Amino acid sequence: MHDPQRLLFISDQHLPIGPPEAIRPEMRRMSRRIGGAMEDLLNRFELRLRREANLVERIACAWLSRHEGNYDLIVNGGDNALPMSRHEDRLRAAREIWGEQLARFGEDRYLALTGNHELGHGYE
């Protein structure tokens, strides 16, 4: 009898990828209607989010480097700050964001789900 598959589930990695508009396009469109003060607030929010995301990414990469051999399958559970309403946009962005990890672990060991914040963290 063989051991059951060892699974690692990662979630809520908000990574700083792409131009600022990629993080919250719906909020950015709304802020343009409201005015410049909202735009400045949103820019500061995104800068802070990117700084924190860089720290999370460094910690996660260091931990994975140490422990990746212990798992047969690594599942990235989405919620990746990809609130894009079009399915194709989320898939393209997820591939861009997680392409490095996909190349590192291989398609047979790595799976990334495309969670969507504005749709209740639903998965496609």
Image (cartoon, helix red, strand yellow):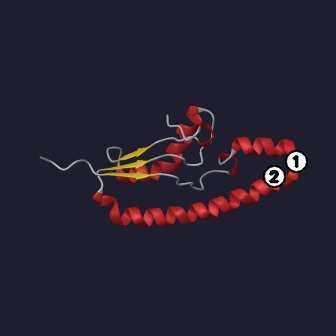
What kind of residue is marked 1? Gly
Q: Are marks 1 and 2 in contact (CB under 8 Å)?
A: yes
Q: Position of residue 88 (x, y in %)?
A: 56, 33
**Outermost residue, front side:** 120
- Left or right: 21 with respect to 14? right
The residue that mark 1 highlights is: 35
Residue 71 vertical placement versus 62 (above, below): above
Q: Quadrant of residue 112?
A: top left
Residue lying at 87% horizontally and 51% vertically, measured from the top left: 36
x and y, in percent, of residue 124 in the image: 49, 34
Q: Residue at x 34, y 63 (%)?
A: 67
| Nearest the eye: 16 or 48 | 48
Residue at point 50%, 43% (across, down): 95
Q: Residue at x 83, y 44 (%)?
A: 32
| Element type at mark 1 | loop
Q: Nearer the viewer, residue 21 or 123?
A: 123
Q: CA distance from mark 1 to mark 2?
A: 7 Å
Q: How far across and down, in percent of the image, does residue 82 sit?
A: 59, 44
Quarter assignment of residue 29: top right
* Residue 55 marker: none
Q: What count of labels does the image hold?
A: 2
Residue position for label 2: 39
In the rendered view, tell whether residue 55 sits above or below residue 37: below
Q: Residues within 10 Å of mark 1 (few under 14, many from 20)?
A: few
Q: Amino acid at mark 2?
A: Glu
- How packed is label 2: few (under 14 Cα within 10 Å), some, or many (20 or more)? some
Task: Name the spot of residue 41 as percent of width and height, x first.
Answer: 79, 57
Q: Secondary structure at mark 2?
A: helix
